[in-house]
């Protein structure tokens, strides 16, 4: 049974359905158990398709699937109007936007931050994949601009940042911190150390929330749950790396205009 996490500010919107889906409720097995939605994994393709069908049905979407992207850790947003026929037709982008009723759209994550957006008045929705590169490069702003192109207004947009790797689990190197602060000098508060000699830890979710505020999105929520620390609920690239596992699944965060 699917039991996605819900953001209260999106849940209250009329005509919008969404979910930050966990790894529970699907048909995949082994390291992919059980709701793996990542076509880029080495999981059985038919199981991935069945998992995605279950999510589309849960959201009341049409076509038995969810439109996702060929994600590139960039800052490009694309509008979609229907389901791609093949994997080769997936848009190369990190945010997907739609105003098509019944068309479920989503993004895949395994530690990066998923962001769902909705303007219930304009009936425009979006889903963004915000890793540190995308967040720094402007994926939030790109998604908002693409929504505006379809008639949304910033003052009407609600956004929610879903489960991702927590600052506790996100240890980075000093070279990462230096590169980041060169591009965003005001972001020093998103790095912490336990002492002067320790490696920094980065607050990805906090930084994405900061970028939403900079984009003048006032109605914002966050689901403060760590993907790396909650193995029973989420896939995690970092945890997979620590455990030396050969591959990993991806959870999906999806939204639809009813």
Image (spheres, rainbow, N blue to C red):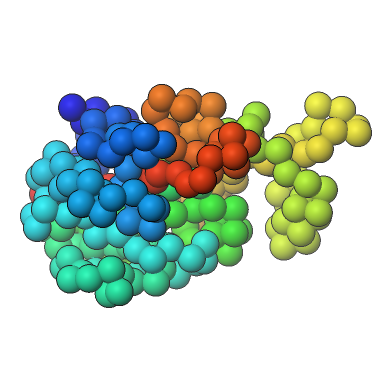
Relative horizontal placement of residue 128, taking residue 239 as reference (left or right): left
Question: Looking at the image, which is closer to me, 71 or 167?
Answer: 71
- What count of labels does the image hold? 0
Which percent across, then down, holds residue 77?
Answer: 39, 68
Which percent across, then down, holds residue 104?
Answer: 19, 54
Q: Residue at the spot x=81%, y=27% of the render?
A: 194
Kindly tell me whether residue 203 is visible in this rendering. yes
Q: Residue at the spot x=40%, y=44% of the render?
A: 249
- Answer with the quarter of the image where residue 232 lies: top left
Which percent across, then down, holds residue 70?
Answer: 38, 66
Relative horizontal placement of residue 210, taking residue 234 as reference (left or right): right
Q: Is residue 164 above or below residue 180?
A: above
Q: Is residue 27 above or below residue 216?
A: above
Kindly tell me whether residue 8 is visible in this rendering. no
Question: Looking at the image, which is closer to me, 175 or 183?
Answer: 175
Q: Residue at the spot x=91%, y=33% of the render?
A: 197
Question: Looking at the image, which is closer to me, 56 or 116?
Answer: 56
Which percent across, then down, holds residue 243?
Answer: 59, 34
Q: Residue at the spot x=43%, y=47% of the render?
A: 109
Quadrant placement of the N terminus: top left
Task: Farthest residue to the right: give it.
Answer: 197
């Amino acid at each position: 049974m699917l039991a996605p996490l819900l953001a209260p500010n999106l849940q209250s919107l009329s005509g919008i359905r969404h979910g930050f889906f966990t790894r529970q409720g699907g048909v995949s097995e082994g390291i992919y158990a059980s709701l793996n939605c990542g076509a880029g994994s080495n999981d059985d393709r038919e199981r991935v398709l069945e998992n995605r069908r279950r999510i589309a049905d849960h959201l009341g979407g049409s076509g038995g699937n969810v439109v996702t992207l060929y994600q590139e850790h960039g800052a490009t947003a694309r509008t979609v109007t229907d389901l791609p026929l093949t994997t080769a037709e997936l848009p190369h982008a990190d945010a997907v936007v739609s105003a098509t009723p019944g068309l479920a759209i989503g993004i895949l994550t395994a530690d990066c931050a998923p962001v769902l957006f909705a303007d219930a008045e304009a009936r425009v929705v979006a889903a963004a994949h915000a890793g540190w590169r995308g967040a720094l490069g402007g994926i939030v702003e790109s998604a908002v601009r693409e929504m505006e192109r379809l008639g949304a207004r910033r003052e009407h947009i609600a956004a929610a940042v879903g489960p991702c790797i927590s600052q506790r689990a996100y240890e980075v190197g000093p070279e990462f911190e230096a590169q980041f602060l060169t591009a965003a000098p005001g972001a020093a508060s998103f790095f912490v150390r336990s002492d002067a000699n320790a490696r920094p830890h980065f607050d990805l979710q906090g930084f994405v929330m900061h970028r939403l505020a900079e984009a003048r999105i006032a109605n914002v929520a966050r689901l403060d749950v760590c993907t790396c620390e909650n193995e029973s609920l989420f896939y995690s690239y970092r945890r997979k790396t620590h455990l030396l596992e050969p591959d990993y699944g991806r959870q999906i965060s999806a939204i639809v205009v009813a």
